[in-house]
Amino acid sequence: MEKILGTFVSEGIAIGKIQILPEPIVVEKEIISDKEAEVKRYEAATKEAIALTDELINKATDDSAKEILEIHKMMLEDLDYTETVINGINEQSYNASYAVKEAGRILSQMFFHMEDEYMRARSADVLDISDMLIKVLAGQGKVDYKTPSIFVGKDIMPSQLVELDPKIILGFAFSEGSVNSHSGIVARNMSIPMVCQLNKSLVNYDGLIGIVDGKAGVFIVDPDSETLALYEKKQKEYLDFQKMLVELKGKSDETVDGHHLKIKANIGKPEDVDKVLQNDAAGVGLFRSEFLFLESEDYPTEEEQFNAYKEVATRLSGKDVVIRTLDIGADKTIPYFDLPKEKNPALGYRAVRICLDRVDLFKTQLRAILRASAYGNISIMVPMIISVEEVKEVKRIINEVMSELDQKNIKYNRDIKLGIMIETPASVIISDLLAQEVDFFSVGTNDLTQYTLAVDRENQKVKFDKHHLAILRMLKIIVDNAHKYGTRVCICGELGADLDLTEYYLAIGLDEVSVSPPAVLKVRNKVRGLNYSDIIKNYKPL
Ligand code: PEP
Ligand code: MG
C-alpha cells in the first residue's frame, strides 16, 4: 500500500481500478525531409487502425455500431482519403499526424456540404478515423476507455476530459494539475473526486486498486484491507451527507431571519442542465459557452449554438440563464482557432479581445444568443473586460446584430440584460464607471485572484491565496460601486462556493453566487443556518 499526499481539487471518495491516461496529443505542423519514412509511418498506422477496428467489429454486440465500424474500416482503406494524406506528406512536407489532421478537416468539410443526408453524416466519421490514426501515430491506439476507473496521469486537458464518458470516470489523480484549472472546475461540476499535485510519476500503478479522497487531497494505491474498509465507510458517510442535502430541495435560499442570497449554478454544456435542476439552483449564473467550441472539431454554426442556448433556456423555464460569450485562450486552446503561440497567453489574445477582433465570430454567437432569448430568460455576459470602451463596442455590435434580426423579422428579447465579468483589477478600479453601462456584474474570482496577486492560477509553485485581503476588499469595492447604480453583483468564480466566506458575502451585500451544481445545496445549507442581523451587527470592515 502507498499513500500519496497531494492537493484537493474536487471532493468525494472514489474507490476502483486505476487506469493510466496518456498525455494529451497536440498535433503540431512540422516540415519533414524524409517523406518516404513519413509515408511508411502513415501506412503502418493505417494497418494498425484497421486491425483495431476489426477487433471492435468482432466485439460489437449492437448491429448499428457494427455498421458504423464497417464504414470506418472502408474509410481507412479509401483511396481518396489515403491520397489526400500522402499528398500532404509528399507535396507540403507535412509530418504524418498533421497530414492526417488536414485530410480529416478537408474531407469532413466536403462531406458536410453534400446534398445527400447519408453522405453528410459521413463528415463525423472522417474526423473519427483521423482521430484514431493520430492516436495510433502517437502510440496510443490501444487505449480502451470502457471500464469504470480512476483515471491517473500527469494532468488532463479540458478537451481530453470532455471526450471521456462520464459514466466510466470514478475519480482522477494527477501528478501535476491545479485546483483552479478548467479541468478541475469541470470535475467539480460533475462531482468527480479529484486530487492533483501528487508530485510523482504514477505510470506504474496501472491496473491496481486506488482510492481518491478528494477533500483530503490524498491518493492511496493498493490499499490493505483495513484501509479499504475505512474508506468504504467514509464513502458511505459522504453519500449520506449528500442525501441529507437533497432534503433541502425546494427550500428557499434564506437565512433564519429571511435575508436572501440567490444561488445559481455554473454550466459548460446543455446536458449540465440535468444537474442544475437536480440540485434545485435558482438558474444558470454562468454558461461557459466556450465548452461548446471545445467539444467541436470546427466552429459550431449559428444553428448549433442557437439550439444549445435555446435548450438551456427552455429547460430552465423562465429562470435566469446567463450566457458568457466566448472565453477562449490561455489554458482553453482550440486547434481550429489557430491561435498564435504566445509567451504569456493569460495576458494575451483571449476572450473579448478575440471577439472584438474577429467580429464575424462574435456576431454569429450574439445572433444565436439573441434568437434563443425569445425562448427563456437569457442574459449576455462578456468576460475579461478592462475598459468602458470595450463595453461600448460590445453594445454597438449587439445593437447592430439586433437591427439585422429586426430587418429579417426574427424574434428576440429586445430588453435582454447585459452583464460583464469583473475579473481584472482594472475593472474593479473602474467598477463605478462600468456599473453605469451594464445591468449586472459577475465576479470571476479565479482570474481576479490570478491577475491581482500576479500568480498563475495553474502554477503549483506559487501560492494562490484565495482569501488574500486584496481580493476580499475588492469584493466590497465592487458591490458598493455596483449598488450605487442599481447594478446587481454575483460571484461566479470558485470562491462563491467557499463556505468560510458566506457570512462575509452577506455582510457586504452580495446579491448572488453562482457555483458548480453539486455545491448549490451545500451553500443553501450554510445560508439557512445563518442569522443575517447577527452578521450585520458583528461586521467589521476588512
Ligand atoms: C473566473 O475567472 O473566476 C471565472 C468564473 O471564469 P473562468 O474560470 O472560466 O476563467
Ligand atoms: Mg475567468
Image (tube, helix red, strand yellow):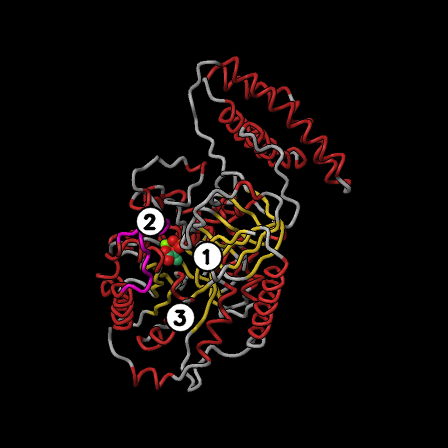
Q: State the CA–CA distance, disc 3 to disc 2.
A: 32 Å
Q: Which mark is residue 352?
A: none
Expressed as whole percent of the image width and height from the top left, the position of residue 13 reads: 56, 60
Expressed as whole percent of the image width and height from the top left, the position of residue 279 reads: 55, 68
Q: Which mark is residue 512?
A: 3
The first of marks 1 and 3 along the sequence is 1
Query: Label 1 amino acid?
Result: Val
Q: Mark 2, mark 1: which one is toward the viewer? A: 2
**Left or right, 140 with reference to 425:** right
State which region is magenta.
454-468
The first of marks 3 and 2 along the sequence is 2
Task: Give me the residue at 35% from left, 86% from top.
Answer: 533
For the question of whether residue 210 can be seen, the reply is yes
Is the Cβ of the residue at disc 1 closer than 8 Å to that at disc 3?
A: no
**Left or right, 392 with reference to 334:** left
Mark 1 — residue? 9
Q: Quadrant of residue 136?
A: top right
Is the Cβ of the residue at disc 2 closer than 8 Å to that at disc 1?
A: no
Mark 2 — residue? 461
**Left or right, 98 with reference to 383:** right
Expressed as whole percent of the image width and height from the top left, the position of residue 329 reads: 38, 44
Query: Label 3 amino acid?
Result: Glu
Task: Give me the residue at 23% from left, 63% from top.
Answer: 433
The first of marks 2 and 1 along the sequence is 1
Please, what is the dominant secondary structure of the magenta stretch?
A: loop
Q: State the CA–CA distance, disc 1 to disc 3.
A: 23 Å
Is the Cβ of the residue at disc 3 closer than 8 Å to that at disc 2?
A: no
Q: Is residue 493 magenta?
A: no
Badge 1 crowding class, 10 Å Cα cut-off, few under 14, some 14 to 19, many 20 or more, is: many
